[in-house]
Amino acid sequence: MDKMERLSNTVRDIAVGGGAVATGIATTATLAGGPPSTELSYVLPRAKSAVVFALPLDQDNIESFLKKEDPAGVNIDNRRVNTMTSGIALEISEYLNMKGFESAPVISNAVYRKDVPGGPYSEMPPLSHRYLAVRSGIGHFGLSGNVILDRYGAAVILGSAVTAAELVPTEALDPEDNYCDGCRLCMSACASGLMAADDTTDVTIGGVEFTYACRRTYSRCDYVCGGFTGLHPSGKWSTWSPARFPIPETDEEFYPALMEAVEPYRNRPRQEFGCNIYHPLVPGNRLDFTCGHCQFVCHPDKEVRKQRYRMITSGGVVIQLEDGSLKAVPPEEATAHLAAMDEKARSMYE
């Protein structure tokens, strides 16, 4: 075993020791021809490779979240795992720096390029953990565009560390082993309609082709997953957001709808989980994790997927009580709750 093989094994072992359940290595060669967000040189001009890894979210919190029984567990776990993932990226980077190889960590989430049209609001990451993950064999693309693992589904957080070391690459997984069967429950569970039903994104990275459902404007996800609104167009179920502003049909309508919902979003009481999530693009900077349905519904066992989808759709509609707490109730009760408010209070929700 040569020096680079030993170093590659060591940095992957650092990730595993920190809690990673899958690791891989992508290089400038294995990423050649990929989208701009696969360019390692954007993060580190002399970059040659990247260590990529996945940490699991706690499955025990997911079902109570989807049933609308308790939002706290998922919010606390999301913050914790993102912090751990970013910390491992820093640990790997500093280890490599100490060994004489220029390196840089890539934070797990909520960092975007400023030098592109739209600046950070374009939500283009410095580096796509997703693309690096599928090319290095951590997981497959599900139809949703989320990276899925054969044990944990899409309930993982991805991280990367970029380095000038010429690490040994790992290969993409065999597409035949991808458990995604196109069930479309991820689409059905998304109140915003982020994923196009009849269009795909096809990318070639290092000579390997990947396909997933085309994602429409990210304003859709911002508007719903960001908690600005949450009532599904059917009116029968919601996310953990108590707001029920209309969800537009066309992409062009989403940004104006989002802007109109900003002030009500600021004025609504926020949840206190003892572990707040902060996001630089969110009004007031505080973010409550209210959705994630496409991520949480996706499970390797199709029967579990179906059960989780039923949890989402039968869990009712979330309302906010006078003390600021959230409660899921039948759709009719939610409508009556809002109707009983005075006009000023109701304007925060619809």
Image: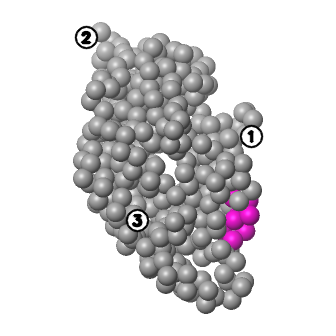
Nearest the camera: 93 or 311? Answer: 311
Q: What element carries label 2?
A: loop
Q: Mark 1 points at which residue?
A: 118
Dominant secondary structure, magenta: helix
Q: Which amino acid does label 1 sit on?
A: Gly
Query: Mark 1 or mark 2: which is in front?
Result: 1
* Vertical order, 221 against 38 (above or below): below
Q: Residue at x 59, y 71 (%)?
A: 243
Nearest the camera: 287 or 84? Answer: 287
Q: What element carries label 3?
A: helix
Q: Mark 2 points at which residue?
A: 1
Give coordinates of residue 157: x percent, y percent. 41, 44
Examine the rendering and report whether any part of residue 299 can be seen: yes
Please rate how many residues cluster around mark 3, counting C-alpha atoms within 10 Å: few if below 14, some from 14 to 19, many from 20.
some
> In this rendering, would 52 be left or right of 152?
right
Query: Which span is picked out in magenta?
Result: 258-265
Please rate how many residues cluster around mark 1, counting C-alpha atoms within 10 Å: few if below 14, some from 14 to 19, many from 20.
few
Give coordinates of residue 76: x percent, y percent. 42, 61
Q: Name the residue under label 3.
A: 313
Q: In which quarter of the image is residue 26?
A: top left
Examine the rendering and report whether any part of residue 106 can be seen: no
Q: In which quarter of the image is residue 262?
A: bottom right
Nearest the camera: 323 or 205? Answer: 205
Q: What element carries label 1?
A: loop
Give coordinates of residue 307: x percent, y percent. 29, 59
Q: Distance between the residues labelled 1 and 2?
A: 47 Å
Q: What residue type is labelled 2?
A: Met
Nearest the camera: 238 or 53? Answer: 238
> In this rendering, would 192 be left or right of 89?
right
Instruction: Tell me the quadrant of the picture where the N terminus can be found.
Output: top left
